[in-house]
Image (cartoon, grey):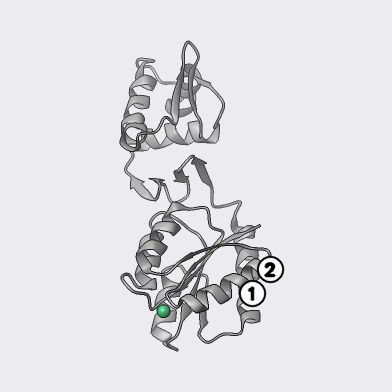
Amino acid sequence: MPKILIVEDEEKLARFVELELVHEGYEVDKAFDGRSGLEKLEGGGYDLALLDIMLPGLNGLEVLRRARRTVDTPVIMLTARDSVMDKVTGLDMGAEDYMTKPFEIEELLARIRATLRKSERRAPDTKVLEAGQLRMDVDRHTVAYAGQEIELTQREFSLLETLLANKGIVLSRATLLERVWGYDYMGETNIVDVYVRYLRGKIDDAYDVKLIQTVRGVGYVIRD
Ligand code: CA
């Protein structure tokens, strides 16, 4: 079932919405302030987020702005103010929809269904590759680990993309060389090892994980 994050500091309202969503069969997670909401959003794994604008710490618009650097979870903004400015700003920053409080729960449920349908249709074009907490958005050309953006060169990016697209499959150096550097590459074949080292430095070593693994005598594989 789709998983929905509610970021709302009015805990009674958050609980009420949670109960209704659970009743509809959704999985629900909650955050009561902007910072923890942002953390959860960046952690990924949500199909949709309900994001209140007036939040303590970090307001909803700021949460959305920062989250959009790494995740494209569909967001419905909740606003108590009937402020055109907030709605426009929210939509400009990539929110899918907004609801003005107080709202009828039935309307919210209908908009959630519509937003989820829209993002399902869109899903095939937004290519996202993942391994563990590593997430690559191919279209946006971004890579993040647990929501923290990682800077990669073009070559590192395409090597990582090839590994991720073949997650769990061991790729030989020759295969990687051909797919990432091309048939006509004339340099040293150990260039693959050099670039795998660069990637490990930025991912495995930086986050203390072992995603990119060496299979002795065969090649490399990325695993969850
Ligand atoms: Ca609020």
What residue would you read off at disc 1? 109
**Quadrant location, the N terminus:** bottom right
In this view, the residue farthest toward the right is: 24
Q: Looking at the rendered structure, which numbered label has been put on residue 95?
A: none
Image coordinates of residue 16 in percent, x first then y, are: 57, 76
Q: Up-down: is 57 above or below 191?
A: below
Q: Residues under labels 2 and 1: Cα distance?
A: 9 Å
* Residue 33, quarter of picture: bottom left
Q: Up-down: is 165 above or below 140?
A: above
What residue would you read off at disc 2? 24
Structural crowding at the residue carrying mark 2, measured as other residues with C-alpha within 10 Å and reported as few (<14), some (14–19) or many (≥20): few
State the count of labels.
Answer: 2
Residue type of the residue flagged with mark 2: Glu
Image coordinates of residue 62 in percent, x first then y, are: 34, 69
Residue type of the residue flagged with mark 1: Leu
* Residue 54, quarter of picture: bottom left
